[in-house]
Image (cartoon, grey):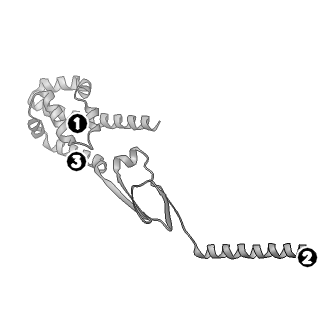
Amino acid sequence: MEKDIEKRYKEWLSRNIWQEFKSIIAESSGEINPEIKESFIERADSIYSSIGFHDLIEKITYEGFEDLLSQAIADYFNTDSDRLFDLNADRFVDFFEKLDKIYAPANDSFTNTIVMPGDLLFTNTDNYEQNNCTWEIDFSHFFADDFQMIAESRIKHAWAMFVTIIAFVAALFVILFLFRKRNS
């Protein structure tokens, strides 16, 4: 179910990004040739599929999305991507800044360190020393995999051990005393 929701979210996001990008491209292509603009608008959905727009969205964390997208559209229009960009530079800049804000966390990573009391018994990190546990987590792993940080420790209380030994010895003496009293 979670994977289905994630898939639907990614599809929704890519479609919305495509809609905005499509309007910018339509304006720019109209400057090159009005016939291209009309053709582009009519075939926008098939272009979405043919350039693999949804797959481009998936590559955002791995490669420069702006370069991939610009190159895909430039290849489609058989023109230089800089020419398309220059025709509507302000809107392209705003669009790519918006994408940066949406996807900026995708390249982040986090370091969490905890100090456990007592002796460390179990942890799911490979990075631990004595009772310190450290996890290096990248953003996509944290959200996509429901990442859990697990650590278990035990505190040894010397006074509790001492009290337990005293209680055991006292109980042993009481049992011996009662045993001798019963036998005498």
Name the amino acid type tagged 2: Ser
Label 1 sits on residue: 21
Q: Nearer the viewer, mark 3 or mark 2?
A: 2
Name the amino acid type tagged 1: Phe
Counting from the top left corner in percent of width and height, residue 45 is at 27, 25
Q: CA distance from mark 3 to mark 2?
A: 95 Å
Name the amino acid type tagged 3: Glu
SS of the residue under disc 3:
helix
Q: Are marks 1 and 2 in contact (CB under 8 Å)?
A: no
Q: CA distance from mark 3 to mark 1?
A: 12 Å
Residue 16 against residue 161 in the figure, above or below: above
- Name the quadrant containing residue 27: top left
Label 2 sits on residue: 184
- Write the residue at 62% across / 73% down: 161
Going by the image, does 161 lie left or right of 63? right
Label 3 sits on residue: 97
Mark closest to the chain's N terminus, 1 or 2: 1
Counting from the top left corner in percent of width and height, residue 138 is at 33, 51
Badge 3 crowding class, 10 Å Cα cut-off, few under 14, some 14 to 19, many 20 or more, is: few
